Amino acid sequence: MATDVSGDVTGVQASSTEQKAPEPQSSRRRRPYRVRFLLVYGILAGVLGAGIAGIVMLVGTSVGGGSRPWSPWQPTKNGSARVTQIAQHVSKAYRLTDGGQLLDVIAKAPAVQNVPIKAVAVRNKAGNADEVSLFDDQNSLMLVLCGGGQSCAIAKGTASVERGRLVRREALELALYTFKYVGNVKYIVAFMPPKKGSQPQYALYFHRNDFDRQLKHPLAETLSTKTPKQNAIPPLETARIDKLTEPHTFKFSLQQAQQGDAILVLDPPV
């Protein structure tokens, strides 16, 4: 546009040297256009500057969001020691009302009395197996949540819905850490502590594919960074824990396969 205006001015000046008197009047007519162009350029520059600033802000937000770690803490060991490190890190944060540790966590390959668990069968209410998953030492993990009492019951305090939810929260956090940082593990079975005087009968069965969204977003978006006390879990987190653990809670039993391996049978809780 600037070149076009300059060309127009040159054309007027070259048309005749005998018409010098009207030149100031012509210049006065062009001055408003010159001001208008300056205003247009100013506006365009402002818009362009705002656009660049917006792009920088968007890129900065994207880069910053993409570089956020999944969790503030990350395991540093390898192999089976990595799983043990996760279990120790998570379990020490969960406390009884008197300040003692809520549970000890034993993490190992799925087995019962040294008999490997080679498959898990999930049955529906009609007693039919809707899902059968094959287990081995590489793709699965067994977590025993033990409360220090007889048959791994929680030795201290009184059983309650709130404490049971805190136990499920711990199992969920253990599973999320394991799925995130132990890439080969696809299945996790977490055996829950029984009530005092009872034998263990409930387990949580987690499949990596069920937590695809939680593993793609920071852990803090699923569970608060600070582990709550059993009677102080925020309502929003309470609903989230129930949503992510109740569908995965089963009553378990063991059956022996023909080749002598164990099959873990999971039934809907009564």
Image: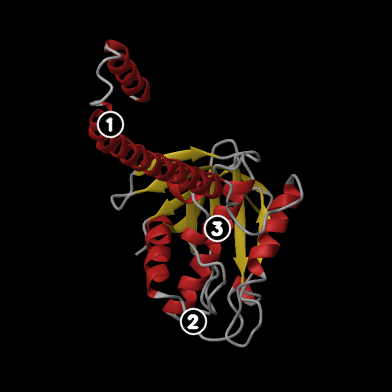
Q: Which residue is mark 1?
A: 24
Q: Is residue 82 above or below residue 163?
A: above
Residue pushed farthest top? Answer: 15
* Position of residue 40 measured from the top left corner of the image (x, y, whole percent): 31, 38
Q: Secondary structure at mark 3?
A: strand
* Position of residue 27 measured from the top left corner of the image (x, y, whole percent): 28, 31
* Position of residue 8 measured from the top left corner of the image (x, y, whole percent): 29, 18
Q: Is residue 2 above or below residue 162?
A: above
At label 2, which amino acid type do we have? Ala
Crowding around mark 3 (Cα neighbors within 10 Å: few <14, some 14 to 19, many 20+) is: many
Q: Nearer the viewer, mark 2 or mark 1?
A: 1
Mark number displayed over residue 159: 2
Where is the C terminus found, in terms of image quarters?
bottom left
Q: Secondary structure at mark 1?
A: helix
Residue at position x 44%, y 39% in the image: 132
At label 3, which amino acid type do we have? Ala
At label 1, which amino acid type do we have? Pro
Residue at position x 60%, y 73% in the image: 94
Mark number displayed over residue 84: none
Q: Nearer the viewer, mark 1 or mark 3?
A: 1
The answer to whether residue 41 is left or right of residue 74 is left
Mark number displayed over residue 190: 3
Cα–Cα span, label 1 and label 3: 92 Å
Which residue occupies the foreground of this view, 81 or 124? 81
Tell me which numbered mark, 1 or 3, is placed earlier along the sequence.
Answer: 1
Q: Is residue 53 above or below residue 23?
A: below
Where is the N terminus found, in terms of image quarters?
top left
Which residue occupies the foreground of this view, 55 or 181? 55
Tell me which numbered mark, 2 or 1, is placed earlier along the sequence.
Answer: 1
Cα–Cα span, label 2 and label 1: 98 Å
Residue at position x 63%, y 71% in the image: 93
Tell me which numbered mark, 3 or 2, is placed earlier along the sequence.
Answer: 2
